[in-house]
């Protein structure tokens, strides 16, 4: 993110060129400025009460910005706005919950509230990208306008999928409804469809594979707690990284003992799904080794991660939605049109790059 001085310089440039730029460009830049400010302000805050207060302040700023510019709000603004919300909410989980029992309970409740808000933002972001995929489609461009959007939109979509995974997987989320669970699963399905619609793009195909791995964790993973991130150091803490790590850990288990293998023994996505990934120059083993060093410390604390069931009870309807979708997916992408995932949930009221770890 840019420094405040750079932001001021860009402000002056926009002011000079105000007659030559679209009217929606100003709120777009305002979203980026708020995101830059919140990342800078919250990055060093350790006190939970102050962190929660600042989070609410920045959330209110984003809400007010949207209300002020509702007359010309559009899909690209909604996507950037939702992604800014998710980046804000992700910072809540980078602050350790280690505290007195009373304080830990307050932190726990606050995180539940944040996950509900993140669920709404992630669902909305996925819906907007689905709409773009359906506009201006042709034989040459079957993915419609998504063919031409910035690559950062796909990063935002994967971040949304990671939050939806956490929303479903967090066993303590007793306040979520079955309708919300169904919508979360359907949004994950839509994200997978979008990523899989670009089979020639290696990083997007890899994202689709990781989403399938998320589902495997939900269905078959061991009982694990989702209250804390597996990497707590702020240099590496990330809700998105956490989701991918848990998915890779589930895939790399010893078939005899059922326990996860040491990270150094993991098979990479490149190795396991070589036939699905487009060809690229061979990556060095040194690069691969460096990418997993940041998570090896988790092996020393694996026992701490074992806690209550990730799901508690399973909702057969939203499992059925995934199974129906994946059956069609395996039969062929051409049959997807037979299933309108967007309408499966029914009526409801709660509506950078993918990261180097995606190569592991």
Image (cartoon, rainbow, N blue to C red):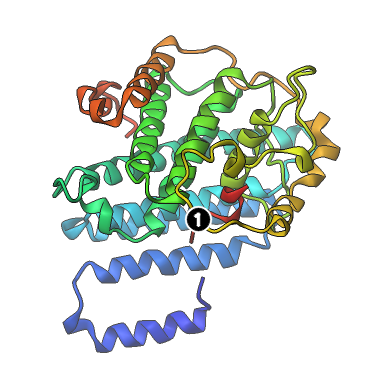
**77, 240: nearer the viewer:** 240
**155, 44: nearer the viewer:** 155
Is residue 98 in view?
A: no
Pointer 1: residues within 10 angstroms few (<14), some, or many (20+)? few
Does residue 133 appear to the left or right of 221 in the view shown? Answer: left
Residue 49 against residue 4 in the figure, above or below: above
Q: Position of residue 76 (x, y in %)?
A: 28, 57
Seen as rendered, the residue at the extreme right is 300
Residue 10 against residue 331 in the figure, above or below: below
The residue at the point 41 percent across, 58 percent down is 152
Does residue 209 appear to the left or right of 81 in the view shown? Answer: right
Q: Position of residue 123 (x, y in %)?
A: 37, 38
Does residue 327 appear to the left or right of 239 in the view shown? Answer: left
The residue at the point 68 percent across, 20 percent down is 222
**152, 235: nearer the viewer:** 152
**56, 347: nearer the viewer:** 347
Residue 78 against residue 318 in the figure, above or below: below
The residue at the point 49 percent across, 44 percent down is 206
The residue at the point 30 percent across, 22 percent down is 345
Is residue 342 in view?
A: yes
Label 1 secondary element: loop
Residue 256 lies in quadrant? top right
Residue at which label 1 appears: 280
Residue 275 against residue 46 in the figure, above or below: above
Q: Position of residue 85 (x, y in %)?
A: 44, 51
Q: Position of residue 272 (x, y in %)?
A: 59, 36
């Amino acid at each position: 993110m840019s420094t405040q001085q750079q932001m001021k310089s860009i402000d002056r440039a926009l002011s000079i060129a105000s007659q030559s730029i679209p009217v929606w460009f100003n709120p777009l830049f305002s979203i980026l400025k708020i995101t830059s400010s919140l990342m800078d302000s919250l990055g060093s805050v350790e006190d939970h009460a102050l962190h929660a207060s600042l989070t609410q302040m920045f959330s209110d700023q984003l809400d007010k910005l949207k209300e002020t510019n509702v007359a010309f709000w559009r899909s690209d603004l909604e996507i950037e706005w939702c992604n800014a919300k998710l980046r804000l909410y992700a910072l809540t989980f980078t602050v350790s919950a280690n505290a007195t029992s009373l304080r830990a309970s307050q932190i726990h409740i606050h995180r539940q509230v944040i996950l509900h808000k993140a669920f709404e933002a992630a669902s909305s972001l996925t819906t907007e990208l689905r709409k773009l995929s359906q506009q201006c489609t042709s034989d040459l461009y079957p993915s419609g306008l998504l063919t031409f959007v910035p690559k950062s939109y796909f990063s935002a979509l994967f971040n949304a999928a990671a939050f939806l995974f956490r929303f479903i997987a967090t066993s303590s989320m007793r306040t979520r409804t079955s309708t919300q669970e169904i919508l979360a699963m359907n949004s994950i399905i839509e994200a997978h469809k979008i990523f899989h619609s670009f089979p020639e793009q290696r990083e997007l195909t890899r994202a689709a594979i990781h989403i399938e791995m998320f589902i495997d964790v939900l269905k078959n993973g061991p009982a694990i707690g989702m209250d804390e991130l597996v990497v707590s150091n702020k240099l590496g803490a990330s809700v998105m990284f956490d989701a991918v790590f848990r998915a890779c850990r589930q895939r790399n288990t010893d078939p005899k003992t059922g326990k996860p293998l040491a990270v150094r023994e993991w098979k990479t996505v490149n190795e396991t799904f070589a036939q699905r990934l487009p060809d690229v120059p061979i990556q060095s083993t040194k690069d691969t080794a460096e990418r997993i060093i940041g998570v090896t410390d988790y092996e020393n604390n694996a026992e701490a991660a074992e806690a209550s069931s990730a799901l508690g009870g399973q909702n057969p309807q939203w499992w059925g939605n995934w199974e129906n979708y994946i059956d069609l997916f395996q039969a062929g992408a051409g049959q997807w049109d037979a299933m309108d995932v967007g309408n499966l949930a029914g009526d409801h009221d709660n509506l950078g790059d993918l990261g180097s770890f995606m190569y592991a």
